[in-house]
Image (cartoon, rainbow, N blue to C red):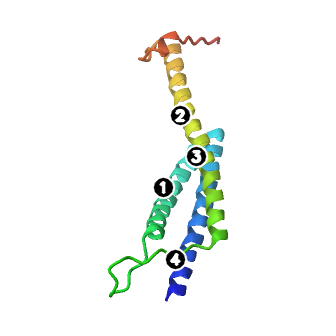
Amino acid sequence: MTTVVAQDRNRKAAEYLQLLGALRDELIRAMGAIAANALAEFEESVASQQILSTRLTVLADQLSLPLEAEPAADIEAPQAPIDSNLAQQIHAVGDSLQKLNRVYAALIHHSSRTTAVMVSLFASVRGQFQEDSGPRSKYQTWSCRM
């Protein structure tokens, strides 16, 4: 039975690795959609990211659970080890995904800020200037030549 459990854990770990790669690809797709100003593609990518993240969470929870103990034992059995090569691949893809996620978060943050500045700029061109609140915004100046 231990072999079957180990095979099941390796299968789940392989699926986890595959989903990490798919999530990495979706982040790249979303950044490309932002660069291309393709809102529909960006929204599709975000929806895919949510689905992948949910499945990854479920698999991570399953992989972190200890194996069921034998009925006569009062202690839980240790976890079946995941294949070391597979574990290394998961860590490598996880590290690259974390780096990519930091870039993605910065891009979203700066894109949001750029959008707010553009809205403010265009509103001022129409004569409806509204000054942002906060200490930094009072020191910024925007001009536009037509």
Q: For the residue labelled by badge 4, is the local secondary structure a helix, a strand or a loop?
A: loop
Q: Which residue is mark 4?
A: 80
Amino acid bearing label 2: His
Q: Earlier in the sequence, mark 3 or mark 4?
A: 4
Query: Camera-side residue: 138 or 58?
Result: 58
Specify the label residue 50 is tagged with: 1
| Amino acid under disc 3 | Asn
Q: Residues within 10 Å of mark 4 (few under 14, many from 20)?
A: some
Q: Position of residue 52 (x, y in %)?
A: 52, 60
Say whether disc 2 or disc 4 marks the residue closer to the N-terminus.
4
What separation in Å lies between label 3 and label 2 (alpha carbons)? 12 Å
Q: Residue at x 49, y 58 (%)?
A: 53
Q: What percent of the width, then of the height, locates residue 142?
A: 57, 13
Which numbered marker is on residue 109?
A: 2
Q: Give the spatial CA distance, label 2 vs label 4.
A: 41 Å
How busy is the neighbourhood of tag 1: few (under 14 within 10 Å), some, or many (20 plus)?
Answer: few
Query: Residue 31: where, in percent of width, then height?
Result: 62, 44
Which callout, 1 or 3, points at the residue further toward the start of the chain? 1
Residue drawn 32% across and 80% down?
A: 74
Q: In the rendered view, does 37 fall on the left or right side of 139?
A: right
Disc 4 and disc 1: Cα gap in Å? Answer: 29 Å
Q: Could you say whether the residue bearing mark 3 is in a helix, strand or loop?
A: helix
Q: Is residue 129 above or below residue 63?
A: above
Residue placed under numbered mark 3 in the picture:
101
Q: Amino acid at mark 1?
A: Gln
How many angstroms separate mark 3 from mark 4 (CA)? 30 Å
